[in-house]
Image (cartoon, helix red, strand yellow):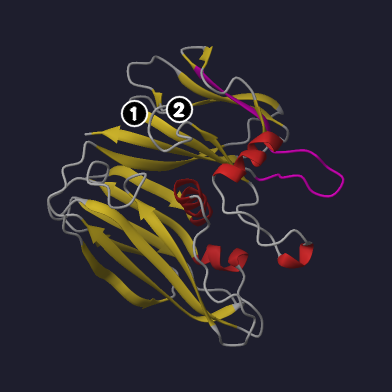
């Protein structure tokens, strides 16, 4: 098959703005979004780079396909590709350039003609990128966007990933969250506010379960610390095990995985269901970020 990789935005200077662009009309495998900046005295850290990108939203005729904040897009990349996004040049040299890259996916795998975004009409599919001026920890910030098209692909499905900000429930204990109905759920990605710190084993979410038509489905009980252990299946290991090595991101994200082998055999099919809920047992009365990763039939 043929593919086309092209520049959509090239070396745009960092600014506080929302930029909207039409995406190509051919079937899309994925987009590549990169952010670059130069160190100021010391190393530009990942925790400093992520706020450079506020959010990314892809819509088709007003319907959301992708809607994620930078931390959640980072986590989605970890989940799908089983490794962390590339962050070049781990150096602290003043003025050295570092680049952080993201994949914005339309299928669980790249270059999959059966699972990608279908052909569209000009102007139907758009991307909105919300950025901010780079912080004082770096300078000369720029970012670029590229697309990978697959002319002739005739997909049966595409991926959807949407962020749901769950408000603080008002108390600790069980908090039921309605999940979208109609598609297959690939995974539920939780980004908590509270993760255990000094003298604490408390998680923002202590336990999670999934209920389909009021019956437990797959996850009857999954404790946060055991979901952390599941990261071995989705992350590429730690760069070090001492404090001097720095934080390993995503430090506060876990997944309820319905596609452990990437073959679709365990997906949670919500079509025709009356009720699909995520029941979170809250260790802290606080907001939680939930990304629902779905496979949408065409």
Find residue 179 and name its label. Answer: 2
- x and y, in percent, of residue 257 in the image: 51, 34
Q: Specify whether 261 is left or right of 197.
A: left
- Residue 22 visible in this rendered orientation of the protein: no
Task: Identify the image quadrant of the C terminus.
Answer: top left
Tell me: residue 274, above or below residue 141: above
Q: Residue at x 71, y 64 (%)?
A: 246
- 101 vs 12, nearest the viewer: 101
Q: Which residue is mark 1?
A: 183
**Nearest-to-viewer mark from 1 and 2:** 1
- x and y, in percent, of residue 206 in the image: 70, 32
- x and y, in percent, of residue 187 in the image: 47, 35
Most frequent secondary structure within the magenta stretch: loop
User: Label 1 crowding class (10 Å Cα cut-off): few <14, some 14-19, many 20+?
Assistant: some
Which element is circle 2 on? Answer: loop
Figure disc tally: 2
Membership of 209 in magenta stretch: yes
Tell me: residue 53, above or below residue 142: above
Occupied quadrant, residue 174: top right
Q: Given the current orientation, which residue lies at the most extreme right position?
A: 199
Cβ–Cβ under 8 Å for marks 1 and 2: no
State which region is magenta: 193-211
């Amino acid at each position: 098959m043929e593919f086309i990789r092209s520049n959509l935005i090239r070396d745009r200077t960092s600014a506080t703005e929302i930029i909207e662009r039409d995406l190509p009309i051919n079937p899309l495998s994925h987009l590549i979004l990169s952010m670059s900046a130069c160190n100021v005295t010391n190393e530009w850290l990942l925790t400093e780079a992520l706020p450079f990108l506020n959010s990314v939203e892809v819509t088709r005729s007003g319907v959301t396909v992708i809607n994620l904040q930078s931390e959640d897009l980072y986590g989605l990349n970890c989940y799908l590709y089983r490794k962390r996004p590339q962050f070049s040049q781990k150096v602290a040299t003043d003025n050295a350039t570092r680049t952080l890259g993201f994949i914005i996916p339309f299928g669980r795998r790249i270059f999959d003609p059966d699972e990608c975004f279908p052909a569209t009409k000009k102007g139907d599919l758009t991307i909105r990128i919300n950025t901010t001026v780079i912080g004082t920890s770096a300078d000369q910030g720029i970012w670029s966007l590229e697309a990978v098209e697959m002319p002739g692909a005739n997909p049966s499905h595409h991926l959807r990933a949407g962020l749901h900000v769950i408000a603080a429930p008002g108390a600790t204990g069980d908090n039921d969250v309605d999940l979208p109905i109609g598609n297959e759920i690939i995974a539920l990605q939780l980004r908590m506010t509270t993760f255990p710190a000094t003298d604490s084993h408390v998680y923002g979410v202590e336990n999670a379960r999934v209920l389909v038509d009021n019956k437990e489905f797959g996850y009857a009980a999954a404790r946060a610390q055991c979901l952390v252990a599941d990261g071995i299946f989705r992350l590429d290991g730690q760069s070090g095990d001492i404090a001097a090595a720095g934080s390993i991101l995503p430090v506060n994200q876990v997944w309820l995985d319905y596609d452990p082998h990437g073959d679709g055999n365990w997906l949670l099919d919500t079509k025709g269901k009356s009720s699909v809920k995520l029941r979170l047992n809250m260790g802290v009365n606080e907001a939680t970020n939930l990304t629902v990763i779905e496979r949408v039939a065409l």
